């Protein structure tokens, strides 16, 4: 059994043995489920790299290229900017 102390900021260092047993690593999130009896269940939520999702969905059209995408986004942002109301500031 391991013990950890809570700091004045509410922080706790998870003991090494617990991190190894639960496979907790830097960047992982911890989910705390508190029961009505005041016991806590801890679940480790692993972070996934965005690159792991590559190819998860089928492509519905060919990729036009980075330059064309940037041009399209720039045009859309320009259209949004044109629709903003003009506010005059008194000198």
Image (cartoon, rainbow, N blue to C red):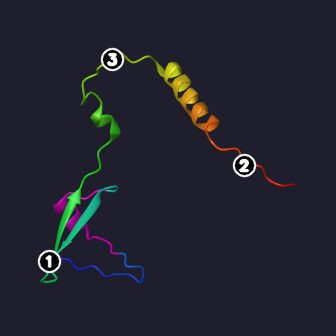
Of labels 2 and 3, the one closer to you: 2
Task: Please name the residue shown 63% across and 42% down the image.
Answer: 84
Q: If the image is split into quadrants, where does the N terminus sit?
A: bottom left
Disc number placed over residue 84 in the picture, else none? none
- The residue closer to the viewer here, 10 or 34, is 34
User: Height in image: 54 above or below 8?
Assistant: above
Residue 15: percent from the left, percent from the top?
26, 71
Q: CA distance from mark 3 to mark 1?
A: 49 Å
Q: Secondary structure at mark 3?
A: loop
Q: Is residue 14 magenta?
A: yes
Q: Secondary structure at mark 2?
A: loop
Task: Please name the residue shown 37% across and 75% down the image.
Answer: 11
Q: CA distance from mark 2 to mark 1?
A: 54 Å
| Disc 1: which residue | 35
Task: Please name the residue shown 29% across and 45% down the image.
Answer: 48
- The residue closer to the viewer here, 80 or 67, is 80
| Disc 3: which residue | 61
Task: Please name the residue shown 35% across and 15% down the image.
Answer: 62
Image quarter for residue 58? top left
Q: Which residues are magenta?
A: 12-25
Residue at the far left in the pictured view? 37
- Mark toward the start of the polypeptide (3 vs 1): 1
Q: CA distance from mark 2 to mark 3?
A: 41 Å
Disc number placed over residue 87 in the picture, else none? 2
Residue 16: percent from the left, percent from the top?
25, 67
């Amino acid at each position: 059994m391991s013990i950890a102390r809570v700091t004045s900021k509410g922080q706790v260092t998870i003991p090494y043995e617990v991190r190894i047993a639960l496979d907790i690593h830097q960047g992982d999130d911890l989910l705390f489920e508190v029961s009505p009896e005041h016991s806590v269940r801890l679940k480790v939520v692993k972070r996934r790299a965005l690159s792991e999702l590559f190819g998860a969905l089928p492509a519905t059209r060919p990729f036009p290229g980075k330059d064309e995408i940037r041009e399209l986004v720039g045009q859309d942002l320009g259209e949004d900017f044109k629709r903003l109301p003009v506010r005059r500031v008194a000198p």
